[in-house]
Image (cartoon, rainbow, N blue to C red):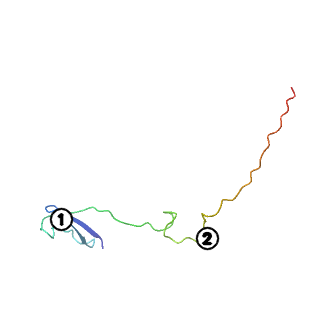
Amino acid sequence: MPIYEYRCLKCKNDFEAMQKFSDEPITSCPKCGSAVKKMMSNTSFMLKGSGWYMTDYAKKSSSTPSKDHSEKPTETTVSESKPSASTDSE
């Protein structure tokens, strides 16, 4: 069940109520009995599964080779090209 936040318009009392989606909204403050309004609040959620972050919570597939960041990069040989000797015949 979701938790809803309410604020009293008169005494500014903030309170929460756990209600079903089908329940009617609360209309009076439990502290002073005045009218209340439903507040908009931030929700918390967690993105699970692969593709969100490199270090996500999902299990890694065994078919995907794992990269070990401690490995040294492979060395590549670079063939050196020597400048050709130019002869001036002029």
Q: Residues within 10 Å of mark 2 (few under 14, many from 20)?
A: few
Residue assigned mark 2: 63
Nearest to viewer (mark 2 / mark 1): 1
The residue at 49%/67% (across/down) is 56
* Disc 2 + disc 1, Cβ < 8 Å: no
- Element type where label 1 sits in the image: loop
Q: Residues within 10 Å of mark 1 (few under 14, many from 20)?
A: some
Image location of residue 34, percent across then percent down = 12, 65
Image location of residue 42, percent across then percent down = 32, 62
The residue at 14%/69% (across/down) is 31
Q: Quadrant of residue 23?
A: bottom left
- Element type where label 2 sits in the image: loop
Query: Residue 13 got which mark?
Result: 1
Which image quarter holds the C terminus?
A: top right
Image location of residue 48, percent across then percent down = 46, 68
Please tell me whether residue 16 is drawn above or below residue 77 in the rendered image.
below
Q: Is residue 43 left or right of residue 48?
A: left
- Dot 2 amino acid type: Ser
Which image quarter holds the N terminus?
A: bottom left
- Dot 1 amino acid type: Asn
Mark 2 or 1, nearer chain start: 1
Number of disc labels: 2
Q: Quadrant of residue 76?
A: bottom right
- How far apart are labels 2 and 1 at the CA level? 56 Å
Q: Is residue 68 left or right of residue 42?
A: right
Q: Residue 90 versus residue 6: which sits nearer the camera?
A: 90
